[in-house]
Amino acid sequence: MLLKVSITSTVSGRFDKNENFKGRFTPRATMLFKVAKDNHLRFSYQTAYRFPSTQQQYINLAVGGAILSGGVPAMKDFYKVTTNPVYSVAALGAGQLKVQDLPEFNPEAVTSFEVGYRGLLAKSKLLVDVYGYIGNYQDFITRVIVAQSTKSTPSPADVINAATRRIISFPINSPTPVKTSGYGISLEYKFKKGFYLNSNFSSDQLGDVPNGYITYFNAPKYRANASFGNTGFGKSKRIGFNFVYRYQSAFYYESDLANGDVPSYQVLDAQISYRLPAINSVFKLGANNLLNQYYITALANPSIGGLYYVSFGYNIF
């Protein structure tokens, strides 16, 4: 028996321009292979870029003992880096005097490849979706912390003494390519009588970042969710419920305001509902973070505790 494969392909592209940077064209292409009924393989090639934000271009703000500066030529001229060079703070920490080069600031570009599968298995009761990708960044936008003399006649020795230097953070492109990779899988299974079990797991990583550079890649290495519920059961299928477990691994958080570890967390959400078909309405009783386990998603953000609610929806189905 011959396997009949159908192929669907899509090609697209876009062009954008910013007044401080040259225009960029980004093509994209995808191919979808139908290898069996309700079973598909997908492949994609994408190019993308991002212009530096307004803050990355023009900010000039003293915060936390350092100055956040933009990366456009006007900001470098403001600090006279041509005649008053800046020195790598990372190198100073190792007892070295190293002039930090601040080359032309460019938009960030990435080329990525993804492969995935989506299909129905187990007599159409199990939906599986799995993917993996790799990406390569060129001109990856990061920040580097430097020291500069505050004297009118600067010398390299000035940056060693805290009293005769200022610390500046400049946005800069990574001098070497930066790689990213990730994968994910989701499973959805339908049981009898309206019960279901869904789960997903994903991971994203960044690699090959030079030492001393701040990436702002604030993504946990692992994330997972699992839910179990029913859309309606009982004598008249009026009762429904849903329980969701959420997990996120710890990661190192970087921002202009704060840097540090964000702890891992795991929380449980729950909801029960009761339908009133005669008036097309439903009562809901639920909680986000049922066990009230406080967690944060970023430094300088408030802690998140339990949220408990009761709702009534009238004439909604």
Image: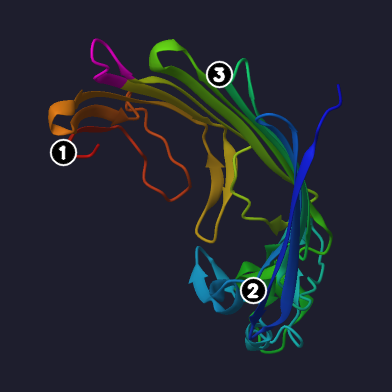
Disc assigned to residue 274:
none
Q: Is residue 177 above or below residue 163?
A: above
| Local SS, label 1 | loop
Asked if one can make out residue 88 in the rendered structure from this viewpoint, the answer is no
Q: Nearer the viewer, residue 281 or 17?
A: 281
Q: Is residue 117 above or below residue 297?
A: above
Among the 4 quarters of the image, the one containing residue 72: bottom right
Residue hosting label 3: 125
Which class describes the residues within 10 Å of circle 3: few (<14), some (14-19), or many (20+)?
some
Work out whether mark 1 precedes mark 2 in sequence or the reverse, and give the earlier one. 2
The amino acid pointed to by label 1 is Tyr
The amino acid pointed to by label 3 is Lys
Q: Residue furthest left?
A: 279
Residue hosting label 2: 165
Work out whether mark 1 precedes mark 3 in sequence or the reverse, and give the earlier one. 3
Among the 4 quarters of the image, the one containing residue 14: bottom right
On the image, the x and y values in percent for residue 61 come to 50, 74
Residue hosting label 1: 314
Q: Residue furthest right?
A: 2
On the image, the x and y values in percent for residue 301 come to 41, 49
Q: Residue at x 47, y 48 (%)?
A: 299
The amino acid pointed to by label 2 is Arg
Q: Is residue 58 above or below residue 28?
A: below
Marks 1 and 3 close (CB-CB < 8 Å): no
Work out whether mark 3 precedes mark 2 in sequence or the reverse, and give the earlier one. 3
Instruction: Give the extent of the magenta segment.
Output: 232-240
Residue 237 forms part of the magenta stretch: yes
- 3D distance between C-alphas at marks 1 and 2: 65 Å
Among the 4 quarters of the image, the one containing residue 280: top left
- 3D distance between C-alphas at marks 1 and 3: 32 Å
Asked if one can make out residue 201 in the rendered structure from this viewpoint, the answer is yes
